[in-house]
Image: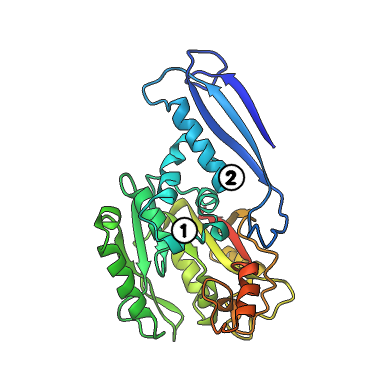
Amino acid sequence: MIRYHRGTTNATGGRRGKRATHLRVHHISEAPTAPTPADHGRRPFYLTVRLLHLAAAPDRISAMRSLAIFVAVVLFGSLTVHADDAGLVAAISGKHRTPEYVERDRYRHPLQTLQLFDVKPHHTVVEIWPGGGWYTEILAPYLRERGKLIAAAYDASDTQADYRPGSRKRFEEKLAADPGIYDRVSVASLMFDEASGKVAIPAAASGSADRVVTFRNAHGWYARGTMDAALAHFFDILKPGGKLGIVQHMADTEQDWMSRNIGYIGRDYVIAAALKAGFVLEAEGYFNRNPLDTGRHERGVWQLPPSLRGVEKDEEKQRLLAVGESNRMTLVFTRP
């Protein structure tokens, strides 16, 4: 249901003054209903749209541009969209993105996720362990002109897991291949001493970040005994008032995720660990949840797409493709 509201306002937010026009989505509430196999995670949503007629100010956005933003938002299924989010919509829609990554948007909801994390174009954002750069492809152009992206990847010397040096090399090669997008990304390292459970190489300086974001990494910190160190470090590198955004494969309350690393961990555990580190839980999004995913896979979450690890029979592949990607928690914490 879409409702349009018309009104006038002045520079101080009153109801009188000179008039200009822009379009702003100021609220969406989602019904957390299960997607159908054909829908793959798209949720019914309700939009409230305010069409404001504002003063003809030098920095106003034209009605046509605002309408374009709104249409893009409806297509992406946004939470809240303002004129400043045009850059985020543009980054998500950019032709530079890997086509296979774009296909994952329907499961990962990048616009909704980054809006919930309240990432702004002037922020210093630390992306923790970016992997193949799925979110880097969006964050780099979005932050390029006014902000700063610090991609805290695996360190090249980190052999505590065999895949880490190669992952770092491929990530650096990806960025070097497209300097027009990635030339201002600062590639750093985050490394733990897993024997002691402490940070060996910090991702950024204390109090330097507006946002720390991490996607589907928390299970590794739990499995290797570095969860407390990771969260304490994120708290340290954030400015007061800064926010930590976490997306993570979510176990259900009856699932045994502690006895072996299956990629899923408990929501209550993540929240408790973050509170222990000093964070305050600010918000939670439900748009990355997938009730079609039971979480009970012989080869863990990696049996689902996009990995489809160990899946050989076409019948099993089609069944898992119908499920889609994993059921995920999306949490926002604030450093007081």
Q: Is residue 223 left or right of residue 126?
A: right
Q: Which residue is mark 2?
A: 79
- Check disc 1 and report its element: helix, strand or loop: helix
Q: Is residue 248 left or right of residue 86?
A: right
66 or 239: which is nearer to us?
A: 66
Q: Earlier in the sequence, mark 1 or mark 2?
A: 2
When asked about the image quadrant of residue 271, the answer is bottom right
Residue at image coords 66%, 67%: 268
Q: Give coordinates of residue 9: x percent, y percent.
A: 54, 19
Q: Which residue is mark 1?
A: 102
Q: Give coordinates of residue 322: x percent, y percent.
A: 64, 68
- Check disc 2 and report its element: helix, strand or loop: loop
Residue at image coords 63%, 66%: 327
Nearest-to-viewer mark from 1 and 2: 1
Residue at image coords 46%, 17%: 55
When asked about the image quadrant of residue 157, the answer is bottom left
Q: Residues within 10 Å of mark 1 (few under 14, many from 20)?
A: some
Q: Is residue 259 left or right of residue 173?
A: right
Q: Amino acid at mark 2?
A: Leu
Furthest residue in direction front, as rendered: 314
Between the C-alphas of marks 1 and 2, the distance is 19 Å
Image height check: is 21 above or below 103? above
263 or 239: which is nearer to us?
A: 263
